[in-house]
Amino acid sequence: MVQRQDIDIYQGDDWAAEVYVTDDQGNVADLTGYTAKSEIRLYTADQSPDVLVEMGTSIDGPKGIITLTAQSIDTTKLVYDRYCWDIQVTDSIGVTVTLLTGYVNMYQEVTT
């Protein structure tokens, strides 16, 4: 089941977070062989076809950890207060599951 998680990003800063994935019993999910994709859009994909930021993703499969990153060059482009985001994983046979979804709360930069 998709979990909701809002994130906070300060405009113009590099940003990173780790997602710890567990199974229904709370055990570490082995993500070996999976790929991950995470995007920030102004609205959902149906309402906003433009991807504003495609976050970097790396997976530590045996530990069930996905690291997400956004570079300052990308966060500088986010000029509104709120965006949508999610993260999906795809296994080796092509089954895709959305793990998290929520809003990106942006804090506008002062110092450039």
Image (cartoon, grey):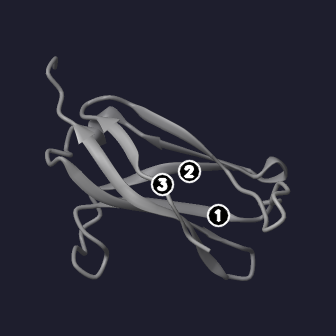
Residue in the image at 76% along x and 58% along y: 22
Counting residues from the start of the chain, the first of labels 3 and 2 encountered is: 3
Q: What is the distance, in whole Å, between disc 3 and disc 2 at their CAs?
A: 17 Å
Classify residue 75 by image quadrant. Answer: top left
The residue where tag 1 is placed is 35
Reply above or below: 43 against 85. Answer: below
Is residue 45 positioned above or below 32 on the image? Answer: below
Residue 91, x across and y down, in percent: 71, 73
Instruction: Give how far apart the Cα atoms at labels 1 and 3 are.
Output: 20 Å
- Residue of label 2: 57
- Please report the residue visible at 24 percent of the width from the left and 34 percent of the height from the top: 11
**Residue 10 found in image quarter:** top left
Residue 25, image x, y percentages: 84, 64
Q: Nearer the viewer, mark 3 or mark 2?
A: 3
Mark 3 neighbour density, 10 Å: few (under 14) some (14–19) many (20 or more):
few
SS type, badge 3: loop
Q: Which of marks 2 and 1 is nearer the N terminus?
A: 1
Specify few, some or many for label 2: CA neighbours under 10 Å numbering under 14, 14-19, or 20 or more: some
